[in-house]
Amino acid sequence: MKAKFVGKCSSCGRPISVGEEAHWRKGFGAWHPACPGPVERDNPPESAYRIVGSPNKDCQGWLPGEVILTPEFHRQRGAPEYLVVVEAKTTYVVEDGCLNRRTRTYEAVCRAAMPEEIEGAALRARRRATAEEENLTR
């Protein structure tokens, strides 16, 4: 189909222009025909990074599209400094048949961030920090 709106590929992060060929699925967003779609994301390519976290490690989980600093474990193994979250989920643990909302793990499938995504994330972080400083000085 042809894109009706300007958007960003949920797989590679590059822009999708109005009129450009694109695929779309509810819950996954739009992606370029050459990029991996939702079915392929269940078995991500070797270039994808799987990261995990838990509240015990000061992790609050991730959101799709978020630019994150790559965990040290992955950087030591050659991963880029910044990643973009493609998919994210939270899993709660069931103990003795009861859902324990305090015990959970976070998982994300990520790809390498492009330079413009890193710059945008840095700018947003600076704006947040400035806003927080202004709130503290009031």
Image (spheres, rainbow, N blue to C red):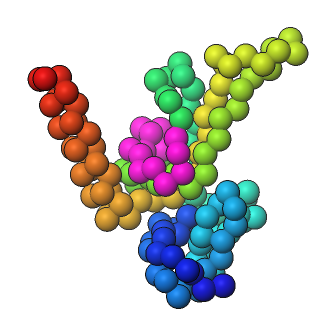
Which residue corresponds to the image point at 60% horizontal and 70% vertical from the top-left? 30
Q: Is residue 63 depicted above or below 97 in this figure?
A: below
Residue 33 visible (yes or no): yes
Q: In this view, does 96 lie above or below 129?
A: above
Report the side of 45 relative to 67 (left or right): right
Q: Where is residue 92 in the image (x, y as percent from the top left)?
A: 71, 26
Query: Can residue 34 be spotted in the picture?
Result: no
Between residues 7 and 97, which one lies in front from this camera angle?
A: 7
Quarter of the image for the C terminus: give it: top left
| Picture coordinates of residue 111, whole percent (x, y) | 51, 58
For residue 32, side relative to residue 94 (left or right): left
Number of numbered discs = 0
Farthest residue, direction front = 138
Residue 30 vs 56, above or below: the answer is below
Q: Give the range drawn in magenta.
A: 62-75
Q: Does the magenta stretch include residue 59?
A: no
On screen, residue 71 versus residue 29, left or right, reads left
- Specify whether residue 65 is painted magenta: yes
Q: Which of 130 and 118 is in front in this view?
A: 130
Among all residues in the image, which is located at the extreme top?
Answer: 96
Give me the residue at 52% from left, 45% from top.
63
Residue drawn at the location 46% of the way across and 81% of the way down: 17
Q: Which corner quadrant of the image does residue 137 belong to?
A: top left
The residue at 31%/65% (across/down) is 116
Q: In terms of image quadrants, where is residue 37? A: bottom right
Residue 1 position within the rendered picture, expressed as x and y whole percent measured from the top left: 66, 85
**Left of 67 or right of it: where is 27?**
right
Furthest toward the left, the residue is 137
